[in-house]
Amino acid sequence: MTERVVIAGAGHAAGQLIASLKQQKFAGQIVLVGDEPFLPYQRPPLSKKFLAGDLPAERLYVKPATFYDDPQIEVRLETTIAAIDRNANRLTTGGGDDIPYDKLVLALGSRVRRLAVEGADLAGLHYLRSIADVEKIRAELSAAKRAVIVGAGYIGLEVAAVARQQGLDVTVVEMADRVMSRVVSAEISDFYQIEHAAHGVKLRLSTGTAAFRGTGRVATVETIDGEQIPADVVVVGVGVVPNTELAEAAGLAVDDGILVDDRCQSSDADIYSVGDCTRHPNSIYQRHLRLESVHNALEQAKTAAANICGQEKQYSQVPWFWSDQYDLKLQIAGLSDGYDDVVIRGNPAERSFACLYLKDGRLIATDAVNAPREFVQSKALIAAQAKIDRDRLADTGLELKELATPAG
Ligand SMILES: Cc1cc2nc3c(=O)[nH]c(=O)nc-3n(C[C@H](O)[C@H](O)[C@H](O)COP(=O)(O)OP(=O)(O)OC[C@H]3O[C@@H](n4cnc5c(N)ncnc54)[C@H](O)[C@@H]3O)c2cc1C
């Protein structure tokens, strides 16, 4: 019987893991160890409502503080894990404490990718990953007139939308030739570029940042094309890197993510891993995935908890994501890479439509803009891997779920 589960990292997945262990009636000790000064919290609002000041910090937490006030749970915040000793089944903290485990769950998340250009260490330049980051950014946005956002991914564009709504002059600098190029198709990028331009955001595509200039504090962003963009504040959102170093140093299998099976077990039977830091198999797409999403963090946490408690639970689901920019909710079901056909359903001009991506006659992904019904029904169709009646996909008079062909 497992008596002591130690959770390394106190983020979103960790919060769910404790809740799931309790639901499974786990009777042993749970030790939560995290380096941030906060109990597990949700990050999505950080670049949306929390940044805008429309959501109080208390609403970010996965569970209220009283939930952890439980003799079964020990919480150690502001504690960095420095090493894993797999022979002795114990962790060592940065402060030199040893923490023994029967089962260890690595829920270490990911960290922001940092720019390595001249001036990247100037004051006024920020990255956004934590509550502490947002508190600094919020204070600076309220005193600034001009913001430059580096990176036009979800987070960069969400920050751009908030800053614009607060009346700042906003410029977004993006290396790719279109926004959100890593996650959506050209059709969706075009739509969002038009929206941001209509809201007054200046987009600089196909160019990177050559340097940040200023004396002590950033004053100008210099692009690779030589443009000098004045900036009172800069927010950089150029992707994340999974926190795998601890696992790698301990000799666990790692390949751009801690490798786990569909039970969330690593290459060591006593060590599970969940959330952003993992790479896991997906039976729908027949490949290994590393995902940066709340859905993945929550579902992997539930899976690991069930298996630790002796139940057989496998994780394989349609990945999904979302992004809120202005009054637009983008919901993405599935992964579109490799599609051979795309159908637009609805009218982009009405600001409610979906792009459906097919491969070999099957729906593999949908990007839905203000179209929650299309999103929900797409998830089911993708999971079923059913053949789709392609010619009727654009007909909004028909429900998507009716378009799976009987042959399957
Ligand atoms: C601004 C922002 C907006 C987002 N928006 C969305 C969205 O709209 N939709 C969506 O699905 N996803 C979104 N995400 C992604 C989502 O938040 C992550 O996928 C999710 O937080 C992953 O949970 P996790 O528990 O794996 O990692 P995390 O929540 O990152 O938690 C990992 C924790 O481990 C800690 N840690 C790392 N190393 C150590 C160590 N050595 N010792 C101790 N502690 C350690 C970290 O500090 C962190 O607290 C967003 C992320 C950000 C930053």
Image (cartoon, rainbow, N blue to C red):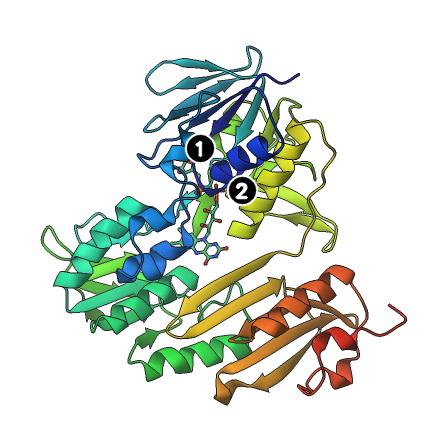
Q: Which residue is identified by label 1?
A: 9
Outermost residue toward the right in this view: 407
Whether residue 397 is situated above or below residue 279 in the rendered picture: below
Q: Amino acid at mark 1?
A: Gly
Amino acid found under the numbered disc labelled 2:
Gly
Q: Are marks 2 and 1 in contact (CB under 8 Å)?
A: yes
Q: Label 2, on which residue?
A: 275
Give percent across and percent down for residue 256.
55, 42
The quarter of the rendering in which ligand 1 is drawn is top left
Determine whether, in the image, residue 124 is placed left or right of residue 184.
Answer: left
* Nearer to the camera, 226 or 34: 34
Q: Secondary structure at mark 1?
A: loop
Q: Is mark 2 within 8 Å of ligand 1?
A: yes
Q: Residue at x 72, y 41 (%)?
A: 314
380 displayed left or right of 43: right
For ligand 1, tell me if the residue under mark 1 lies within 8 Å: yes
> In the rendered image, is residue 225 in sight?
no
Residue furthest top as drawn: 88
Give the position of the C terminus as an image quadrant: bottom right
Mark 1 is surrounded, within 10 Å at the Cα level, by few (under 14), some (14 to 19) or many (20 or more) other residues, namely many
- Spot occupied by residue 293 in the image (x, y as percentages of width and height): 52, 52
Residue 103, labelled with which disc?
none
